[in-house]
Image (tube, rainbow, N blue to C red):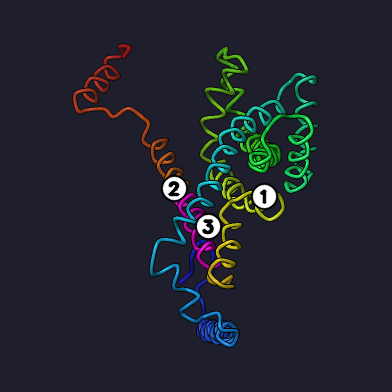
């Protein structure tokens, strides 16, 4: 029995896939055992190293929660600034005016080509030399500046690609009925492209959350990952346990973002499919009667 996408597997293919699956499981089990044995030999699985995370709230209230707050604060502020800035730059790149399109393209290509860590370091030096920002706040401002500049340029390309992916007939039909280009962009193209762009936009938001860790590693920004090093020193070199807990928190945050994006994308698609007006029985009868008599509805 065949499918539209592929042919049904024969007996030999089924046996071969079973062997491949069994071999993969054996290799995976061996790798997991090797990791477990290595950690156990180094004493990293002893209860005394994991106890602070499961027998009290001191580790969370003193180290993890403050670091998580800084991570979420920097990521949220970066998202709020980068999203509209990226949308403006992406639309500007589609402008018919050269004096708008070319500068926008130069800004996007320039900041998209520079590593975000370099932008953060540059921001730190900029705030130190040319502003009165307190030294304790400079790492936060530098992290947000680097994240905004880099991710706004990436989001601009996502917006531009999402709009260009729409059929040209959409804009041509809108202009044929007398709509101006800004109306076509605002009322026709952007609403339709949002659904297609949503997965890529959320993926970039996940990148923003993770890239806040660069500020902790280089700029002494007290974010979530930096709290792991502080905890491991305070509780006695339990770096593996600290990093495991912090990694689990990152997974929860990013998985929540992607799950929300999937739910929102599905909701938007369903709403588009069901956006037509629902006619009752009386309405149907009236339309049929008007069609039969030749009168206008």
**Tag count in the figure?**
3
Q: Closer to us: mark 1 or mark 3?
A: 1
Q: Residue at x 57, y 45 (%)?
A: 205
Q: Residue at x 48, y 69 (%)?
A: 2
**Residue ranking furthest to the left:** 282
Q: Secondary structure beneath disc 3?
A: helix
Q: Residue at x 57, y 43 (%)?
A: 75
Residue 287 location (% of width, % of height):
27, 21
In front of the other: 84 or 145: 145
Earlier sequence position, callout 1 versus callout 2? 1
* Residue 133 visible, this angle: yes
Do the numbered discs 2 and 3 sit on residues whose CB atoms are within 8 Å? no
Q: Which mark is residue 260?
A: 2
Quadrant of the image for the C terminus? top left
**Quarter-of-image position of residue 131:** top right
Earlier sequence position, callout 1 versus callout 3? 1
Q: Residues within 10 Å of mark 2 (few under 14, many from 20)?
A: few
Q: Secondary structure beneath disc 2?
A: helix
Residue 170 location (% of width, % of height):
57, 27
Quickly name the residue at label 3.
250
Q: Closer to us: mark 2 or mark 3?
A: 3
Relative to 165, say whether 60 is above or below: below
Relative to 251, say whether 145 is above or below: above
């Amino acid at each position: 029995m065949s499918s539209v996408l592929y042919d049904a597997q024969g007996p030999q293919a089924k046996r071969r896939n079973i062997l491949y699956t069994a071999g993969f499981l054996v290799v995976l089990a061996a790798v997991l055992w090797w990791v477990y044995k290595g950690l156990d030999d180094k004493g990293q699985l002893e209860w005394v190293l994991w106890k602070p995370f499961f027998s009290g709230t001191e580790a969370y209230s003193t180290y993890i929660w403050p670091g998580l707050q800084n991570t979420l604060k920097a990521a949220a502020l970066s998202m709020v600034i980068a999203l509209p800035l990226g949308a403006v730059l992406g639309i500007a790149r589609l402008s018919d005016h050269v004096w708008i399109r070319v500068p926008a393209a130069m800004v996007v290509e320039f900041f998209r080509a520079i590593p975000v860590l370099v932008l953060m370091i540059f921001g730190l030096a900029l705030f130190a030399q040319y502003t009165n920002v307190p030294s304790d706040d400079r790492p936060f401002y530098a992290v947000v500046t680097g994240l905004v500049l880099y991710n706004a340029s990436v989001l601009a390309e996502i917006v531009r690609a999402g709009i260009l992916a729409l059929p040209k007939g959409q804009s041509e039909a809108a202009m044929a009925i007398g709509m101006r280009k800004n109306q076509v962009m605002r009322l026709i193209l952007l609403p339709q492209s949002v659904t297609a762009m949503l997965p890529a936009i959320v993926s970039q938001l996940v990148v923003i959350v993770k890239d806040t860790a660069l500020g902790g590693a280089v700029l002494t920004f007290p974010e979530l990952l930096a709290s792991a090093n502080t905890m491991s020193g305070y509780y006695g070199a339990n770096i593996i346990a600290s990093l495991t807990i912090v990694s689990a928190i990152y997974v929860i945050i990013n998985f929540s973002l992607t799950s929300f994006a999937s739910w929102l994308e599905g909701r938007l698609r369903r709403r588009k499919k069901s956006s037509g007006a629902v006619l009752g029985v009386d309405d149907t009868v009236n339309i049929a009667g008007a069609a039969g008599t030749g009168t206008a509805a």
